[in-house]
Image (cartoon, rainbow, N blue to C red):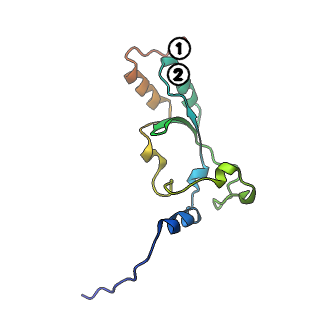
Amino acid sequence: MNIPAFPSIDITTETITNNKCERCTNSTCCTYVTQQIDVPRSKYSFEILLWQVSHRGVGVYKDEDGWFVIFDTPCSHLEVDGRCGIYEDRPAICRTHENDFCEYDAPAEDGFDLYFPDYPTLLAYCKNRFKKWSTGNPAPA
């Protein structure tokens, strides 16, 4: 059997990163917001996180950069086709967004050390971390 040879394609990192946004069909990076938070150490800090993840579309994760609250909410400027509706006037954070490694390559969750998308997952972690866990009236610590 004679298999035809395919021409080699020179794909550089620059080519890939420059075209990633053009090839991305679901604009994942524009469908959530994260906010870094202080490292939760006390039961009270975790009670606050439990309250936050009790809200629809709110989660918490820890990665190599620290702890974050994540809000699953798409940008109001996303067009139906996934493109930015205010591209020329987009905020600086959007302009400086780097896609060397982004959700196009792998889901963000792959880089999380800990991920709590909802109340039950965070509560289970709290009960394991604090041997005498109680969801009573915690005093601020």
Where does the N terminus fall, quadrant-wise?
bottom left
Residue occupying the point 52% across, 66% down: 14
| Circle 2 residues within 10 Å: few <14, some 14–19, many ≥20 | some
| Circle 1 residues within 10 Å: few <14, some 14–19, many ≥20 | few
Circle 1 sits in a helix, a strand or a loop, which is it? loop
Residue occupying the point 46% across, 29% down: 122
In the shown orientation, is residue 120 left or right of residue 140? left
Residue occupying the point 43% across, 23% down: 126
Residue 106 vertical position relative to residue 22 in the rendered view, above or below? above
Amino acid type assigned to the residue bearing label 1 in the image:
Ala
One can see residue 40 in this view = yes
Quarter-of-image position of residue 125: top left
Look at mark 1 in the image and give the residue it sits on. Answer: 141
Look at mark 2 in the image and give the residue it sits on. Answer: 45
Question: Which residue is at the far bottom?
Answer: 2
Percent from the top left, x then y, of residue 37?
Answer: 56, 31
Give how far apart the Cα atoms at labels 1 and 2 are. 8 Å
Contact between marks 1 and 2 (CB within 8 A): the answer is: yes
Residue 97 vertical position relative to residue 124 in the rendered view, above or below? below
Residue 19 vertical position relative to residue 127 in the rendered view, above or below? below
Percent from the top left, x then y, of residue 132?
Answer: 40, 14
Quarter-of-image position of residue 6: bottom left
One can see residue 23 in this view = no
Residue occupying the point 57% across, 51% down: 29
Which is more N-terminal, label 2 or label 1? 2
Amino acid type assigned to the residue bearing label 2 in the image:
Ser
